[in-house]
């Protein structure tokens, strides 16, 4: 099954340490098992635009849909046998220490 990992920063996490951020090694481990689909960092919230269409009218709002102390700073898509396997992969991501990783199962089209 496919899972979306939302990578978030979190002020309650360990202080960020670039030397401890081994995200590249995390990706390589998942690529070696064929579990890694794609992922990337996202630009800051100030560059986001939220789009809504109501009554046929499109409105845009500067910024993310939701605001809070945790911000989405990246994403990964992985294939995992089950939710427990996806959670284990997320727990091994360096941002699980420095921030948080939200794991969401993906419903496939068709």
Image (cartoon, helix red, strand yellow):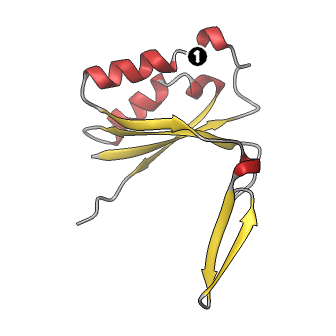
From this view, report whether residue 21 is shown above or below residue 52: above
Query: Number of labelled discs?
Result: 1
Residue occupying the far top of the picture: 19
Q: Whole-percent x and y of residue 23?
A: 50, 21
* Residue in the foreground of this view, choosing between 36 and 103: 36
From this view, report whether residue 30 is shown above or below residue 19: below
* Residue at 70% in and 19% down: 16
* Residue at 72% in and 50% down: 47
For the residue labelled by badge 1, is the local secondary structure a helix, a strand or a loop?
loop
Q: Whole-percent x and y of residue 91?
A: 48, 27
Q: Whole-percent x and y of residue 12?
A: 74, 30
Residue occupying the far bottom of the picture: 55
Q: Whole-percent x and y of residue 94?
A: 55, 22
* Residue 65 appears in view: no
**Residue 57's quadrant in the figure?**
bottom right
Classify residue 46 as left or right of residue 43: right
Q: Residues within 10 Å of mark 1 (few under 14, many from 20)?
A: some
Q: Quadrant of the C terminus?
A: bottom left
* Residue in the foreground of this view, choosing between 87 and 63: 63
* Residue at 77% in and 43% down: 69
Classify residue 19 as left or right of residue 39: right
Q: Which residue is mark 1?
A: 21
**Residue 88's quadrant in the figure?**
top left
**Residue 7's quadrant in the figure?**
top right
* Residue at 60% in and 23% down: 97
* Residue 10 appears in view: yes
């Amino acid at each position: 099954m496919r899972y979306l990992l939302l990578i978030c920063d979190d002020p309650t996490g360990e202080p960020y340490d670039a030397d401890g951020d081994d995200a590249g090694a995390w990706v390589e481990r998942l690529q070696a098992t064929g579990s890694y689909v794609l992922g990337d960092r996202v630009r800051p919230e100030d560059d986001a635009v939220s789009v809504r269409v109501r009554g046929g009218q499109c409105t845009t709002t500067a910024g993310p849909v939701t605001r809070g102390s945790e911000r989405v700073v990246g994403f990964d898509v992985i294939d995992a046998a089950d939710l427990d396997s996806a959670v284990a992969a997320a727990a091994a991501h360096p941002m699980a220490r420095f921030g948080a990783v939200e794991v969401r199962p993906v419903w496939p089209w068709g």
